């Protein structure tokens, strides 16, 4: 069978640096092809070339066996090759129907609203998605936006669908819905390219797997030929035995006592304690109030309830108050809330602690010294120190954000989604950083949607559901089944031991 | 060594080009008299534009500065005329007038800033409103005419515009000091860094424990005080204020900031650039008046072309960086 879309000996250089070294790669109709690799392995470049956003330096893109006729993303879409980007390409103030038909609105002079709504509804029905065509994108959940993106792609008669980490922003349940849609698309003969850092998804979903490393294909395999370990080893190029650090076993006294803590309107009456040297995992669905709880704890949101820090009652009205009590928070949204993407590493690193770098005038040398230390301590790999942070890879951004969060020397640090959208090698590094912090006597709260992460890192797990604590698990009781039960609320009385 | 790019060097190159062009077209262009004239005229807009740089860098905008200048001038003249019988002609009267000007400027900036940060109204809307209010108030107080400073007081006050030391007049000196302090504040202090951070992404700034509202408020207050300072130096020039004092100053100040390479959407501020921008705008005016090449009536058109060109060049630079 002729591949729907293929790359033939594709090389790509940016300036003098070649980033793709002769890629051969084919997407076949009715097949899900997973492309995996560490950040910087060349996945995005390949997707951009397939989608018409970049042209290759040498080699060919073949559409149905013929040289692809498109030179831009728009032309590629017209030819049936649609890319769903990680950052959705939807106009937030327009309705679902308006987005689905954006750029190819029916009607001659006046818009044919009725036809747009009707056809959008048909597309959504086909996807089993219960969103109204008249809903505004702004008001939709992330998973629904993804469905709209897929509907938009289907509306454009996509024959090849390229999905860049579609599951990164979805919860467990939403991912399942996504998988059903992917199965359906596969059955209808669409050729799919799928990228993800979650290897269990890849194993489950992909008919064919291509592993990239340093701009070259290092392994191609069919369904069932590669285990998750095998994929990770191929990606990293070495064995990854110890993704997670060994468990810690001795903890100090209670450093934080949270009682009857509410962050209206989401979080209700949460109580827990945190010990010195402990990693407390917080699990739960997106929307269960995990992030709101964390933001309340560091004074970013108004809250009620009592907080005791080493036995002393404290009140927090701002992040500055929280910092004064040794609390720090690393946001889940590093691009919108964590880092200034158009600023340099130095400016980002010191932003929340500028007061330490000189009284009236900021001392540039002191800042540079701090950056040098951060780069060493957290193994931040930046081609140039004065480059914009937005041009760093996700993993290095996350390490910088971690360095920034740790700069005020907090005793308690809350890390929200420590490894979202990060490759497995860097993930493991971050896990070991977290372990080092705990062993150095800090207390760490890790909020995560990634189940292996919660299981592998936590000394204790707090599960949240609908703004309340659904249960607490400790030691050997921390199992995937137990956590999932609490998350979903299936047998709450039986497992809740808090 | 850092960022020696088009947006830094472009305006400077344009300025040098204009100076060369001016010298070529008219022998008087480089005379001390003409240079003093150009710089003194730049000083008022210049001080305001330095303040405006901070407002724009932190993601704000102030359309009210021209009207504010008129309002402050009116208040200052009224206050000085009122205090004349008690204080008499002399230094105390001038100092009192200056204090009134700075105080009114501070309050006007505070009003803008509080409406923007506390009431959460868009800067464009707030200052569009206060722009109308300030100008209308002056016109109303002057009853549609002109508010004039007492003749003898004016004679005493005149040297503040026309006098100076070492042959450099006061407006130029004060502008130079404001520019240097402004550059230091933007480059080397927390305030400047916070302005850039807020303009770049105010949510990141808030999550980084930056007191976003307070910094934004400070930018408007500082701008108000600088408008007061500019007015102090402007009033002795004519000794009067009317509904048309400071007309379109806000646009000239904003234009200077933009020509200088500061991003209108915020996040990137250049005080030196602003100074260069102000000088470019005054030089164009000056050259058109000195040379018969193009009608001075086309001044606005040429300035307009330069503004658009400056923004186009900035954009060319940012897309070249691949972001």
Image (cartoon, grey):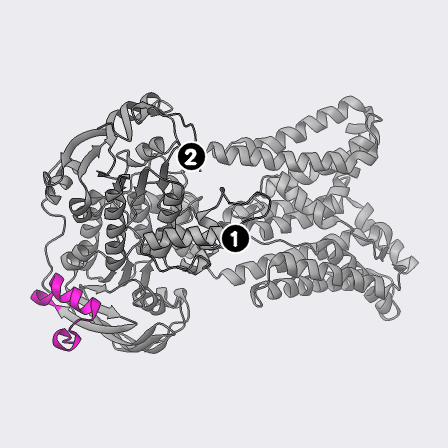
Where in the figure is residue A220, as x and y percent of width and height?
Answer: 16, 32
- Of all chains, the one bearing label 2 is A
Return the residue at label 1: A113
A476 magenta-colored: yes
Where in the figure is residue B90, as x and y percent of width and height?
Answer: 84, 61
A159 magenta-colored: no
Q: Please indicate whether residue A429 sits to the left or right of residue A16 in the image.
A: left
Part of the protein shown in magenta: A474-498
Helix, strand or loop for disc 1? helix
The circle drawn on residue A78 is 2
Q: What main secondary structure does the magenta stretch of the protein show?
A: helix
Task: Write the residue at 32% across / 35% down.
Answer: A47
- Residues A153 and A206: in front is A153
Instruction: Name the quarter where the N terminus of chain A is drawn.
Output: top left
Q: Is residue B15 above or below residue B155?
A: above
Task: Write the residue at 14% across / 76% down.
Answer: A497
């Amino acid at each position: 069978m002729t591949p729907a879309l293929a790359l033939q000996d594709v090389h790509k250089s940016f300036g003098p640096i070649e980033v793709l070294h002769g890629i051969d790669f084919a997407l076949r109709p009715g097949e899900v092809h997973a492309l995996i690799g560490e950040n910087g392995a060349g996945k995005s470049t390949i997707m951009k070339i397939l989608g018409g956003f970049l042209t290759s330096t040498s080699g060919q893109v073949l559409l149905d066996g013929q040289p692809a006729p498109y030179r831009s993303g728009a032309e590629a879409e017209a030819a049936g090759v649609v890319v769903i980007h990680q950052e959705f390409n939807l106009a937030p103030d327009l309705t679902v129907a308006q987005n689905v038909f954006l750029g190819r609105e029916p009607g001659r002079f006046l818009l044919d609203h009725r036809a747009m709504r009707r056809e959008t509804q048909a597309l959504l029905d086909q996807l089993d998605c219960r969103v109204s065509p008249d809903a505004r994108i702004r008001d939709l959940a992330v998973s629904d936006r993804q469905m709209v993106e897929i509907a938009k792609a289907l509306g454009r008669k996509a024959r090849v669908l390229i999905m860049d980490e579609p599951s990164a922003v979805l919860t467990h349940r939403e991912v399942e819905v996504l998988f059903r849609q992917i199965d359906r698309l596969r059955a209808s003969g669409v050729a799919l390219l799928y990228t993800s850092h979650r290897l269990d998804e890849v194993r489950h979903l992909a008919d064919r797997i291509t592993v990239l490393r340093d701009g070259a294909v290092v392994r191609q395999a069919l369904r069932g030929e590669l285990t998750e370990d095998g994929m990770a080893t191929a990606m990293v190029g070495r064995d990854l035995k110890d993704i997670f650090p060994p468990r810690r076993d001795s903890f100090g006294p209670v450093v934080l006592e949270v009682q009857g803590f509410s962050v209206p309107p989401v979080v209700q009456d949460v109580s827990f304690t945190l010990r010195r040297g402990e990693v407390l995992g917080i699990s739960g669905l997106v929307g269960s109030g995990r992030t709101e709880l964390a933001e309340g704890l560091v004074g970013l949101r108004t809250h009620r309830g009592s907080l005791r820090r080493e036995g002393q009652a404290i009140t927090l009205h701002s992040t500055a108050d929280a910092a004064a009590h040794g609390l720090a928070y690393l946001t889940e949204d590093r691009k919108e809330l964590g880092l200034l993407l158009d600023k340099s590493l130095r400016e980002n690193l010191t932003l929340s602690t500028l007061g330490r770098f000189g009284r009236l005038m900021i001392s540039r040398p002191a800042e540079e010294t701090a950056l040098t230390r951060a780069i060493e301590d957290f193994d931040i790999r930046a081609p140039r120190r004065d480059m914009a942070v937005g041009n760093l890879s996700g993993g290095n951004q996350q390490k910088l954000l971690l360095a920034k969060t740790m700069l005020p020397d907090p005793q308690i640090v809350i890390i929200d989604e420590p490894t979202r959208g990060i490759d497995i090698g860097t993930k493991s590094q971050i896990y070991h950083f977290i372990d080092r912090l705990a062993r150095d006597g800090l207390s760490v709260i890790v909020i995560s949607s990634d189940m292996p992460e919660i299981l592998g890192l936590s000394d204790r797990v707090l599960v949240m559901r609908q703004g309340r604590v659904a249960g607490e698990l400790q030691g050997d009781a921390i199992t995937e089944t137990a956590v999932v039960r609490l998350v979903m609320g299936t047998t709450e009385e039986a497992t809740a031991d808090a | 060594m850092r960022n020696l790019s088009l947006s830094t060097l472009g305006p400077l190159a344009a300025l040098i080009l204009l100076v060369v062009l001016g010298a070529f077209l008219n022998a008087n262009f480089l005379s001390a008299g003409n240079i003093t004239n150009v710089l003194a005229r730049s000083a008022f807009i210049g001080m305001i534009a330095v303040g405006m740089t901070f407002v724009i860098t932190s993601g704000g905008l102030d359309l009210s500065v021209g009207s504010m200048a008129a309002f402050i001038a009116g208040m200052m003249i009224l206050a000085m005329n009122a205090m004349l019988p008690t204080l008499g002609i002399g230094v105390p009267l001038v100092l009192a007038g200056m204090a009134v000007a700075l105080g009114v400027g501070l309050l006007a900036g505070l009003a803008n800033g509080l409406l923007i940060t506390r009431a959460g109204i868009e800067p464009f809307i707030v200052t569009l409103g206060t722009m109308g209010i300030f100008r209308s108030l002056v016109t109303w107080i002057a009853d549609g005419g002109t508010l004039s400073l007492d003749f003898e007081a004016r004679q005493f006050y005149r040297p503040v515009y026309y006098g100076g030391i070492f042959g450099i007049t006061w407006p130029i000196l004060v502008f130079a000091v404001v520019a240097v302090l402004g550059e230091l504040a933007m480059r080397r202090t927390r305030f400047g860094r916070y302005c850039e951070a807020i303009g770049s992404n105010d949510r990141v700034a808030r999550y980084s424990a930056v007191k976003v509202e307070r910094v934004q408020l400070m930018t408007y207050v500082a701008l108000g005080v600088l408008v007061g300072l500019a007015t102090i130096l402007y009033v002795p020039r004519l000794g009067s204020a009317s509904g048309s004092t400071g007309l379109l100053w806000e646009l000239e100040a904003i234009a200077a900031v933009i020509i200088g390479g500061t991003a209108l959407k915020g996040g990137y501020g250049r005080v030196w650039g602003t100074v260069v921008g102000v000088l470019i705008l005054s030089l164009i005016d000056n050259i058109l008046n000195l040379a018969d090449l193009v009608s001075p009536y086309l001044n606005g058109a040429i300035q307009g072309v330069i503004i658009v060109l400056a923004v186009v060049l900035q954009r060319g630079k940012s897309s070249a960086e691949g972001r």
